[in-house]
Amino acid sequence: MCGIVGYIGNKKAQPILTSGLRRLEYRGYDSAGIVTLGDKQATLLRAKGKVAELVAFADGNATDDTIGIGHTRWATHGVPAENNAHPHQAGDIYLVHNGIIENYKELKATLTNHTFKSETDSEVLAALIDSFYTADATLESAVIQALQLVEGTYGIAVISTREPDQVIVARMGSPLIIGVGEGDLVIASDASALIGHTTNAIYLNDGEMAICTREGVTLEDLEAQPLTAKVEQIEADMSAIQKQGYDHFLLKEIMEQPTTLRSTLNGRVVPSEYRAQLGGLNMTNDELRDVDHVVIIGCGTAYYAGLLASYYLEQLVDGLTIDVEIASELRYRSFNLPKNSVALVVSQSGETADTLACLREIKRRGVRTLGVINAVGSTIAREVDGGVYVHAGPEISVASTKAFTSQVAAMTIFGLQLAQTKGTGAKELSEYINELAELPDEIEQVLGDVREEVKAVAEKYAHYEHGLFLGRDTLFPVALEGALKLKEISYIQAEGYAGGELKHGPLALIDDRFFEVMLLQDNWLFDKSISNLAEVNARGGHVLAITNSNKDIDAEEVIRIKTKLDLLAPLVLNVVQQLFAYYVAVARGNDVDQPRNLAKSVTVE
Ligand code: F6R
């Protein structure tokens, strides 16, 4: 949430900053700003709205400055407006900030010499640093003194017209990376902004600060004690962050699932050897055998992926108990974890604040944590005891799609590995292994078969303001995910429900303002689901059925998919609803990649 960039070197800073902000725009798009330093003079440019507005402004105010910082904002304190846009100025200093300063009101009350121009907590931090930036102080000492008074989270970059040859960055809870180029440094809140500049990067940890100059990086803690900077290689694939001919990143990310899923499965699922195994768990077979309980933690789509995977894990591993928890809830509960638990920490970005807080609490209790993470080098990935990267590649669209499919697949492999190590359920294991191996081809086939049909149906349903997604068993978490996808990009109010729960309340909703998506799988629950469908029809519903069945289905619209999968068919049905949500949002004229009020990578609570 919020994107930070910075540059110091010998090239013109403005275009580097604005192109970095374009890459980071998915982290927030309420306003954007940059400031560069020339000879004792700063050029501050800020604009409400998307980075394109800022770029238009910057085109008419170009400078040759070779140092600067920039920010794209997701509003926390104060409405989206130019005065609330970063960078914030206080005296000689300029600051960009990602995170929340929790004690900003108390601090603000003490800063009586500063005239506040914004409603933000970030300007308070700028003013606080400035209050310590007396004539004999350095920017470094002022930043350290200020940060010692701050409660909350931050990733910051600070520059000063008085010391125009350095960018100071610090981190507590909000990610920051320093890309080390040839004679220059690029600072960013995520690695996508470094692609094309360098593949060498220093990841800051919480409580670390770096002084970035043209000579290099000096790393220290918040008491100015020196630390050793470790330069790591980042994966850099320019094509992965481009639309590649698609109208939107979201469509590209839906359509590339066969490929991304193959990367998830690669080397991990080998049907010919009857093997499914994850490297990187850092657990011995004895330790795996001892696992009696799994707790899965995530937010939003990652939580729903955990919910679906829990159905698979409990089928796969005899006697295993599983809880799936919403991270933002769990972190404040006085929860208990049974002995011999393992926590699966699921996150696409690897930066979600609530998920990270749970991870730290669970680790503090001495329970082993395993990451199911997409973003390589992210904070959660670095802090877990072991785990896997799902290798779905960068997700640029704010709505998560390909990560869901890969997360479920990775957790299913974990279940298989656990079952194989414990020696349970031989028949079902081979079915799962075969279905996992076939899943990419099945998804590819279905995406090709139904795309045009889904588009036409979506256009028909796009005028509704309310939707109900219904499914049973493994299709229940899929219904929850379908509703989330639709609501976040189409702004249609959508609910996911277990089909069997209809008569316990939701049936009261059905009228002509509602449509219903009924997920139907041709299995032992088919007839029961058909009864649920009949209950909706009897009340004048407008049902779209999405199914793998050839049987008669009495619904307004039926989208049928052909798949030979059974256990994993819900994942195939899910890609159909992803397409449906996409085309509904397009038909409504929405900005599908950057839906209103949202941002990717939720690094604040
Ligand atoms: C929904 C969506 C969000 C994320 C959630 C968790 O499409 O994108 O619900 O799934 O914010 O994010 P990660 O997986 O990055 O922890």
Image (spheres, helix red, strand yellow):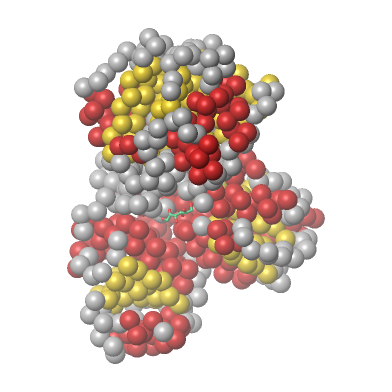
Q: Which is more toward the observer, 136 or 535?
A: 136
Q: Is residue 52 left or right of residue 236?
A: left
Residue 490 against residue 104 in the figure, above or below: below
Residue 191 visible somewhere in the drawing: no
Residue 105 location (% of width, % of height)? 50, 44
Q: Is residue 449 left or right of residue 318?
A: left
Q: Viewed as shown, does residue 504 lie left or right of 244? A: right
* Residue 113 percent across, percent down from the top left: 46, 29
Residue in front for this viewpoint, 151 or 46: 151
Residue 331 visible in this rendered orientation of the protein: yes
Q: Where residue 365 sits: x, y (%)?
A: 75, 54
Q: Viewer-proximal residue, 562 or 478?
A: 478
Instruction: Using residue 279 as the reference point, say whether residue 169 is left or right of it.
Output: left
Q: Residue at x 25, y 45 (%)?
A: 247
Q: Quadrant of the N terminus?
A: top left
- Farthest-out residue, right: 286
Q: Which of 55 and 141 lies nearest the eye of the viewer?
A: 141
Q: Residue at x 21, y 22 (%)?
A: 60
Question: Where 153 falls versus 453 (above or below)?
Answer: above
Quarter where residue 287 is shown: bottom right
* Residue occupying the point 57% across, 69% down: 311
State the residue at coordinates (66%, 49%).
360
